[in-house]
Amino acid sequence: LQNYRMLFSQSTFWKAIGNTILMAVMGLLTIPVGFLLAVLVNSLGRSRLQEFFRVGFYLPNIITGVSVYLIFRVVLMTDGGLLNNVLSAITGRQVSIGWLADPKFARWGVTIIWVWMNAGYSMLMNLASLQAIPTDLYEAASIDGATSTQQLFRITLPLLRPTTELVVLLQLIACFKVFGQIQLITGGGPAGSTKPLIQYIYETAFSKNNLGYAAAMSYVLFGILLVLSLAQLIMQ
């Protein structure tokens, strides 16, 4: 019980919780990105080209953490990084944002990596749901004079709602468990701005050898994931 009393009085624990929640919410950008990719891929029809893009967009989801680190170390470098070079070309001035070195931007750097790795999963889920919508609904709407925008908001999005709710919950659960990518890419820095709860648990247990305190935090994480999992079951 003393571990729990210490736990809830430590600012570092609440900072780790805050980082976890904030990055989990930012990670939900995978949902709209995945939806847009699904719409684009679905517009290709059932063809070999669609299969190519379907596999291509999903591929980052199965790449190992070390490979991701090697790729984005180049993409997100402060000086000469691919992303900063693109932004410099667009804005017409030199951009030197520390996507992984500046506490103000490090969470966005981690989010970019997360979206790149997981948008393909969201795309596949949305694509399957899009292809399950009966085409006669769109034909009837067109006959009644519905525009493409009206069909999107009155047919597509309402019928995709169960899939969207499921993907949101799965992404939240996955974000709360993220560890390997952050450990490799930022190590929780700079200044602890990207340190999630699970990494704080790991450091407390295996670097500081405070196993009881780490176990108490693990039960808190378990409780959060239990609530999210129950919410997913209720929605299903």
Image (cartoon, rainbow, N blue to C red):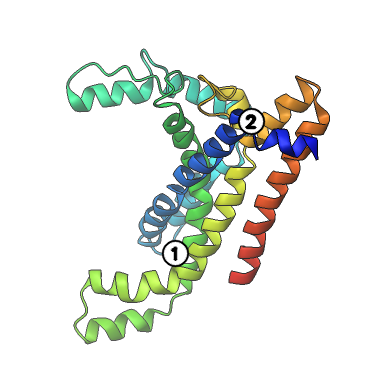
Left or right: residue 111 versus residue 79 is: right
Callout 1 environment at 10 Å: few (<14), some (14 to 19), or many (20+)?
Answer: few
Identity of the residue drawn at 20% across and 74% down: 147
Of discs 2 and 1, which sits in the foreground? 2
Quadrant housing the N terminus: top right
* Image height of 205 relative to 5, above or below: above
Q: Secondary structure at mark 1?
A: loop
Amino acid at the residue labelled 1 = Arg
Where is residue 13 drawn, in percent x and y? 62, 33
Q: Is residue 4 above or below residue 183?
A: below
Q: Nearer the viewer, residue 95 or 144?
A: 95
Measured in 3D between alpha carbons, the distance from the residue under mark 2 to the one under mark 1, in whole angstroms, is 55 Å
- Who is closer to the viewer here, 103 or 80? 103
Residue in view at x 50 percent, y 39 percent? 23
Eyeballing the image, is 52 above or below 9? below
Taking the spot 67% from the left edge, 52% from the top edge, the residue there is: 225
Q: Report which residue position mark 1 lands on.
A: 46
Q: Amino acid at mark 2?
A: Gln
Q: What's the mark number on residue 142?
A: none
Q: Where is residue 174 shown, x and y percent of the image?
A: 61, 47
Q: Earlier in the sequence, mark 2 or mark 1?
A: 2
Query: Can you name the residue that lies furthest to the top here?
Result: 79
User: Would residue 57 be seen by someone viewing this image from the given angle?
Assistant: no
Left or right for 187, reference 126: right
**Residue 47 point in image, percent of width and height:** 44, 60
**Would you name the residue on which mark 2 appears?**
10
